[in-house]
Amino acid sequence: MKIVEVQNLTYSYTHKGMPIISDVSFSMDEGEIVGVLGPSGSGKSTLLRLLSGLEMPTKGSITIAGNVVANEKKFMQPEDRGVGMVFQDYALFPHMTVRENILFGLSRLPRKDRKSRLREMLELVQMEKFEKRYPHELSGGQQQRVALARALAPKPNVLLMDEPFSNLDQDLKGSIREELRMILKTANMTCIIVTHDRNDVNAICDSSIIFGEVPLSDGKCFECI
Ligand code: ATP
Ligand code: MG
């Protein structure tokens, strides 16, 4: 089954404005990691906002795990879509420990299952030793792993990441890329990663979607806009 199906998606921020997203179609298999590449202002974050339910499509439809979550007649709320988000700045809660940050994503899970899920996530991102620390006591890469664990903890159908490496230096980026791909593949997570950097896509993703004028990557190109 396709986990994500986007058909003829079109979106403008204003009623009569130019579409930012124009007739985009693509689909994703379970466990597939897709990179979205494109210059600033080309609509990458807007695509994630549409998938997560922060914006309503002007035209077209979005189906996630077999459920139509948005089309011209229907609009499913963000919390019901089973979509996880990791934003550009990770947005960890500064006054919560690693443990509390991850538990925050589990408020919808039955109480009895929360602890085992927490352990599973700490192990997945290899942060078991840091669970009592606060975000400011962690390196950039460690913070990124916690943000990832928090987003993965509710086991979303699809994980959306917007420029997840923008706060990391070049050396760290190299090791984090490999680690991220391994974590996502271990969890069999279907994931969209928005980035400016073609090397991110080459290192992590199975395929890519190109917005605007960006040289083709080695991955297959679903849709060139
Ligand atoms: P970047 O790489 O800089 O993050 P992006 O590809 O993520 O860029 P978007 O944030 O999706 O780009 O923005 C696409 C276009 O939509 C831009 O021209 C932007 O100015 C416009 N835009 C974004 N948010 C709004 C808004 N709330 N109202 C009107 N226009 C908007
Ligand atoms: Mg953006």
Image: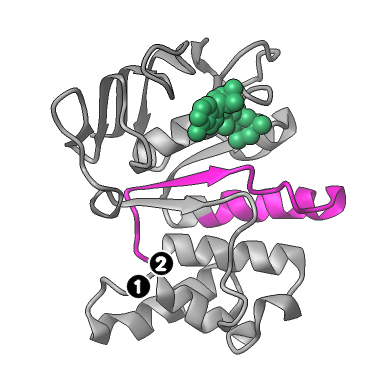
User: Which labelled disc corresponds to residue 6?
Assistant: none
Residue 126 occupies quadrant: bottom right
Q: Position of residue 177 (x, y in %)?
A: 68, 48
20, above or below 78, in the image: above
Task: Name the amino acid, label 1.
Answer: Leu
* Residue at horizontal 56 percent and vertical 82 percent from the top: 96
Please check the rendered image and state whether residue 162 is part of the magenta-colored stretch, yes or no: yes
Asked if labels 2 and 1 touch by Cβ distance under 8 angstroms, the answer is yes
Which residue is under mark 2? 153
110, above or below 52, in the image: below
- Respond yes or no on whether mark 2 lies under 8 Å from ligand 2: no
Quadrant where ligand 2 appears: top right
Front-most of 177 and 21?
Answer: 21
Question: How many numbered discs, if any?
Answer: 2
Which residue is under mark 1? 106
The reply to whether residue 195 is visible in this rendering is no
Report helix, strand or loop for mark 1.
loop
The magenta-colored residue range is: 154-183
Task: Name the amino acid, label 2.
Answer: Ala
